[in-house]
């Protein structure tokens, strides 16, 4: 998913999280409730050894959802700020920031043999790929076109 | 804009090759392929076991094996077919198709996906190893209790029971990991615009399946662990002499065991309407009704378990409750049947192999469902319980309803997966041989059951000889005809006529927008659903 700022100087690509944080909590609560109600029910019939397995399952689900939650904030962005082109990549706790001189930065769109396109930004020899994970080919073409136009504007 | 073509630039194409690709892969399509391959191998293993059983039953008297070995084959055949063939096949399709159908780049938790698969081979080894150990004089073979592990037989059984208990634990962990992954993927990774009520039916089928697994696997895990402690640690959970209750195990086992039927069938019910709409060339009828029917069936499936042991001596109110609640499942199922038939109604139908399997599936699974209604009747069940009628009924449900459905799915998606068209003539021959020999195998078993032949016996009265002979011959034809399927699948993987992206003229859905075969990482390009 790609988001453009109003002036077109900031482009952010991020995953589409179709589950909101609130829904995520409700999903976990629902599954934990169902699992534990069943486990408690059969425990009352004497099968108490079901309880630890139900507990492990709820724990595993919690870990899985927590992992997903930690990646909610992942994004890649490119910002045109004054004389600089700033590319940022954020994945969980890892952030990378690349700053290029606007005058030397080039935007290149390359296609591979399987028909997909990739955007490369930066001066010759120091290019980095942008929008690998969160954009489709059409969006990459559009973003590359827009960036190219913005970089050509005399400021 | 400068556009340069480079030989092989896409960083996603930099994936491991050779054996490491398969051991370490986190790619949903690779893992799906491994699940499907594993399922096919175990289908042949489980099939070979049942051919041994049918060879023994070809005529009365003991011909080929001792009764204990016969019982071992029966139990392991069921466990292999249910846990190592049908479930992995459905999971293989889930891995392959769910990300493609909802426009996601991969499953939400790819490494968990890899672990889920690699728990399966050890569990298959645990299930079958006791046979090999017995050849060397170690232990007394695999579990001989049937797949249900009923105590006290399972408490008194040999080491095969322990192996099976650990195998069930591993399979359970694998299923739970897979379910968590599917739930998270379906809720969080849908393409923009794809609301829950726009999800393909296959995704819905798997969502309910995953919820059922999450709800029931801990109960099975607890039950078999209690069995293990009864066997080795001096507990008496299921030992009446020690104050325990063997019927409690039956309650626990079937609390898992009955939803398990729907766990096996819901994914198939998910892709059947998609195949029907493709080859009827008209939109699916009653999408919402089918989704609600899925929910209804899922909910009812966890409250009907005791119909599997009506004859165990349950109180009358319980018998009545479980009889009526079991029969109530036929209502949402009738909705599904109606929608499937209405999807075909006045359609511009063509009968390629997937459609043949699907139409055959509807008829045969219908027979399985209707004979299930007979067994749901408490009074009738007293007569038919533990007879060959039950064997025939659940094979109409699980072979026709499960495996033939899976085969429809394989023929439907194989061109998309491999990029090649399968041999249509061979596919049709496979269908007709399967359908005819399946009916010739199991219709006689209905009659055997009605005449009173009990299941799980290696010898029988002379009056049952003719029907058993017909059933055995047909079972061998059924088994051998599956080799056509194996040949067709392998030759399609190796080459053949190039498949188009859409493959089928009437196909609808995101998976058909990708090339055939799809690129290693699908939807790095996220589609938008309108």
Image (cartoon, coloured by chain):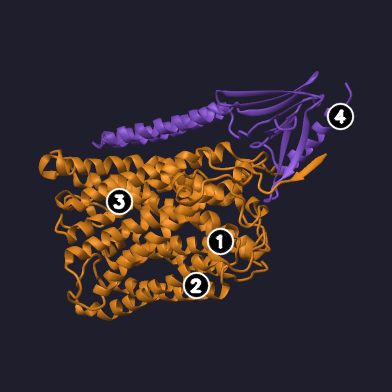
The single residue placed furthest to the left in the displayed view is: B241
Label 3 vs label 2, nearer the camera: 2
The color chain B is rendered in: orange
How far apart in space, not on screen, are marks 4 and 1 (Cα)? 48 Å
Q: The residue tagged with tag 4: helix, strand or loop?
A: helix
Tell me which numbered mark, 1 or 2, is placed earlier along the sequence: 1
Kindly check if marks 4 and 1 are in contact, taking CB atoms under 8 A apart as contact. Answer: no
The residue that mark 2 highlights is B431
Image chain in purple: A
The residue that mark 3 highlights is B319
The residue that mark 4 highlights is A152
Position of residue A135 measured from the top left corner of the image (x, y, whole percent): 69, 38
Q: The residue tagged with tag 3: helix, strand or loop?
A: helix
Label 4 vs label 2, nearer the camera: 4
**Residue B223 is drawn in which quadrant?**
top left
Kindly check if marks 4 and 2 are in contact, taking CB atoms under 8 A apart as contact. Answer: no
Instruction: Name the quarter where the C terminus of chain B is drawn.
Output: top right
Q: Nearer the viewer, residue A36 or B233?
A: B233
Dot 2 surroundings within 10 Å: few (below 14), some, or many (20 or more)? many
Measuring 23% from the left and 44% from the top, which residue is drawn there?
B248
Position of residue B307 measured from the top left corner of the image (x, y, whole percent): 32, 53
Label 1 vs label 2, nearer the camera: 1
The residue that mark 1 highlights is B414
Q: Is residue B186 above or below residue B129?
A: above
């Amino acid at each position: 998913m790609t988001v453009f700022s109003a002036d077109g100087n900031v482009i952010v690509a991020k995953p589409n999280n179709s589950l909101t944080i609130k829904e995520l909590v409700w999903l976990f609560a629902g599954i934990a409730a169902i699992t534990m109600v069943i486990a408690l029910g059969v425990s009352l019939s004497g099968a108490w050894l079901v309880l630890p397995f139900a507990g492990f399952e709820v724990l595993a689900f919690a870990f899985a959802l927590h992992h997903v939650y930690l990646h909610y904030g992942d994004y890649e962005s490119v910002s045109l700020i004054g004389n600089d082109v700033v590319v940022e990549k954020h994945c969980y706790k890892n952030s990378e920031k690349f700053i290029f001189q606007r005058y030397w930065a080039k935007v290149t769109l390359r296609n591979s043999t399987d028909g997909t396109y990739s955007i490369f930004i930066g001066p010759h020899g120091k290019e980095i790929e942008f929008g690998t994970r969160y954009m489709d080919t059409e969006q990459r073409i559009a973003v590359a076109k827009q960036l190219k136009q913005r970089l050509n504007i005399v400021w | 804009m400068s556009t340069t073509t480079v030989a092989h630039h896409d960083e996603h194409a930099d994936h491991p090759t050779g054996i490491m690709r398969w051991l370490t892969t986190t790619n949903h399509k690779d893992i799906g392929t491994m699940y499907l391959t594993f399922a096919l191998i175990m289908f042949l293993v489980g099939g070979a076991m049942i051919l041994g059983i049918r060879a023994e039953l070809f005529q009365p008297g003991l011909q080929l094996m001792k009764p204990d070995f016969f019982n071992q084959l029966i139990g392991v055949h069921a466990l292999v077919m249910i846990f190592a063939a049908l479930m992995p096949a459905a999971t293989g399709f889930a891995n392959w198709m769910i990300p493609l159908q909802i426009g996601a780049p991969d499953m939400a938790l790819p490494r968990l996906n890899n672990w889920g698969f690699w728990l399966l081979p050890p569990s298959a080894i645990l299930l079958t190893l006791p046979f090999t150990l017995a050849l060397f004089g170690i232990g007394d073979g695999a579990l001989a209790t049937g797949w249900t592990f009923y105590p006290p037989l399972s408490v008194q059984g040999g080491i095969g029971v322990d192996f099976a208990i650990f195998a069930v634990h591993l399979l359970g962990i694998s299923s739970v990991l897979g379910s968590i992954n599917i739930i998270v993927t379906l809720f969080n990774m849908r393409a923009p615009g794809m609301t829950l009520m726009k999800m393909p039916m296959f995704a819905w089928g798997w969502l309910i399946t995953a919820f059922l697994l999450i709800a029931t696997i801990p109960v099975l895990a607890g039950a078999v662990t209690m069995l293990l402690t009864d066997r080795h640690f001096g507990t008496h959970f299921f030992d009446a002499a020690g104050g325990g209750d063997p019927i409690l195990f039956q309650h626990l086992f079937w609390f898992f065991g009955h939803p398990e039927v729907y766990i096996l069938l819901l994914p198939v019910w998910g892709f059947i309407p998609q195949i029907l709409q493709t080859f009827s060339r008209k939109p699916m009828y009653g999408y919402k009704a089918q989704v609600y029917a899925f929910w209804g069936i899922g909910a009812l499936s966890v409250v009907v378990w005791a119909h599997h042991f009506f004859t165990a001596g349950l109180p009358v109110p319980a018998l009545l409750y479980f009889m009526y609640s079991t029969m109530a499942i036929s209502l949402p199922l009738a909705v599904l049947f109606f929608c499937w038939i209405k999807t075909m109604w006045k359609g511009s139908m063509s009968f390629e192999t997937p459609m043949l399997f699907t139409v055959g599936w509807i008829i045969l699974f219908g027979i399985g469902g209707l004979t299930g209604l007979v067994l749901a009747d408490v009074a009738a069940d007293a007569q038919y319980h533990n007879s060959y009628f039950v064997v025939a009924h659940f094979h109409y449900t699980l072979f026709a309803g499960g495996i033939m459905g899976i085969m429809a799915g394989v023929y439907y998606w194989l061109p998309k997966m491999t990029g090649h068209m399968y041999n249509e003539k061979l596919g049709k021959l496979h269908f007709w041989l399967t359908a005819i020999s399946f009916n010739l195998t199991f219709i006689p078993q209905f009659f055997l059951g009605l005449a009173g032949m009990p299941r799980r016996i290696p010898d029988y009265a002379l009056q049952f000889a003719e029907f058993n002979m017909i059933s055995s011959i047909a079972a061998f034809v059924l088994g051998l005809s599956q080799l056509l399927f194996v040949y067709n699948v392998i030759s399609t993987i190796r080459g053949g006529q190039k498949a188009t992206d859409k493959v089928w003229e009437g196909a609808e859905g995101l998976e058909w927008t990708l090339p055939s075969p799809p690129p290693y990482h699908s939807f790095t390009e996220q589609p938008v659903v309108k």
